[in-house]
Amino acid sequence: MKAIRPLPLVAFAVVAGVVGWFVNVMVAREGWPAIRFPWSAALTMGVLCLVAVGFGWGVYRTRTGKAPRAVEPLVAARVLVLGQACAHAGAVVAGWHAGVLAASGLAAGAGMSQTVVASLVMTGCGLALVGCGILVEYFCRIPPDEGEGLEPHR
């Protein structure tokens, strides 16, 4: 499985930000409230971070030989996929709410409205989810075998 690359994460965030900005500008023109996650989503993303890092820590302890019981390789692969999913979902959430923030800032004249504060919090939560995903991926990384990479592959 390939490691998380920063370019796709940035691309997801930028696309989600542009879409979030466009949709919220159109919604604001009709007089509707901004489309953003509810406050409970911050708690949900925090719990998801803790669960993912907890599972990743178990894999890391197995990898370093400090765990009392080994983790199955399939479980480790699933934890890795969970970490990558967290990073990608966090990029989309952060991008969307950055777009909402941009649209709300332009519409409200940069005042600290409920939407602006919520968008700031959700953007931070999305970035935290990206960080947790990258950390979990680091925990699940397998060290290279000795001698690997010294000879060219044919």
Image (cartoon, rainbow, N blue to C red):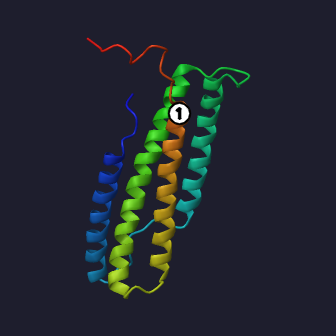
Drawn side of residue 136 relative to residue 90, left or right: right
Q: 104 left or right of 112?
A: left
The residue shown at (54%, 39%) is 136
What residue is shown with label 1? 79
Q: Helix, strand or loop at disc 1?
A: helix
**Left or right of residue 114, residue 151 in this image:** left
Classify 10 Å Cα crowding around label 1: few (below 14), some (14-19), many (20 and above): many
Which residue type does callout 1 highlight? Val
Classify 115 as above or below 40: below
**Furthest-top residue in view?**
154
Residue at 33 percent across and 76 percent down: it is: 103
The image shows residue 95 at horizontal and vertical percentages of 37, 61
Residue 75: % across, % down: 55, 26
Give percent across and percent down for residue 131: 50, 50
Q: Is residue 138 above or below residue 44?
A: above
Q: Quadrant of residue 61?
A: top right
**Residue 128, placed above or below residue 66:** below
Q: Quadrant of the C terminus?
A: top left
Residue lying furthest right: 68
- How many numbered marks does the figure carry? 1
